[in-house]
Image (cartoon, rainbow, N blue to C red):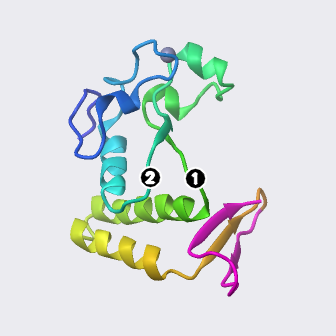
Amino acid sequence: MNSRTALSHRYFQPWEWACRDRCGGGVNEMNYDFTRRLDLSRGLGETLYRVRSAYRCLAHNKAVHGVSNSAHLLGDAADIETLNGRARFMVVAQTILAELVILGFLAPGQARYYAEVLEGQGQIRIGIPNKDFVHLDIHPDKPAPWLFTY
Ligand SMILES: [Zn+2]
C-alpha cells in the first residue's frame, strides 16, 4: 500500500506529522509506507519517540534550510528526537527491527522481544563520525547500549 491519506496509526496521532510552521499541511500528505514503519518501531519499546519534524511545506523547508529535494517535502521523512545515546541506539534498533517485520522476517512479538533484550542487555557502543568508518567498542565504564556521533 502506498497511500497519502490520513490512515490511522496505533502509536501516533495525526498532528504529529503536521508541518511545524502550523500551516496545516502534512496530516494528509505523509506516505503510509513510511509512517507504518515508524508506527511499528515506536510500538516496539518504551523509548521516547517524539517527532521533531515530519512533513514540511516548501516555505517551512526553506525556513529550516532543508535541502531542496528533501524527503520531508514528500511526506517520506521524520526527524525523531533522541535525548541521549541510549535513546538514539533504541530508535535505530527499533527501526531496523520494524523493517524486518515489514519485510516479513520477524513477527511483531519477536521484534518487541529483541528490542527489550537489546535495551536491557546490549553492551555494544556505536560511534558515527562524519567519515567513512564507524567506531565500535565495549568500554566497561561507559553506558551501553549507546549510539553517538562525533
Ligand atoms: Zn508549513
Q: Is residue 62 above or below residue 53?
A: above
- Does dot 2 land on a helix, a strand or a loop? loop
Cα distance in 3D space between marks 1 and 2: 8 Å
- Residue at image position (31%, 70%) is 111
- Sequence-first tag of 1 and 2: 2
Q: Is residue 1 above or below residue 117?
A: above
Indicate the position of residue 2 as horizontal and vertical percent values.
28, 37
Q: Confirm or deny contact between disc 1 and disc 2 (CB under 8 A).
A: yes
Q: Residue at x 62, y 65 (%)?
A: 147
The residue that mark 1 highlights is 83
| Circle 1: residue type | Leu
Tell me residue 47's x, y (percent): 43, 58
Q: How many marks?
A: 2
- Residue 127: image location, x then y, percent: 70, 67
* Quadrant of the snapshot with the C terminus: bottom right
Residue 149 percent across, percent down from the top left: 71, 59
Q: Magenta region: which residues?
A: 132-150
Circle on res. 144 = none
Determine the secondary structure under disc 1: loop
Q: Give the position of the N terminus as an image quadrant.
A: top left
Name the image quarter holding residue 25.
top left
Majority secondary structure of the magenta segment? loop
Residue beneath the point at 43% across and 49% down: 49
Above or below for 126 versus 35: below
Other residues around mark 1 within 10 Å, as few (<14) / some (14–19) / many (≥20): few
Along the line of sight, which residue is nearer the eye, 147 or 70? 147
Q: What residue is shown at x 57% (from left), y 18% (from top)?
A: 60
Disc sitting over residue 48 in the figure: 2
Given the current orientation, which residue lies at the most extreme front position? 141
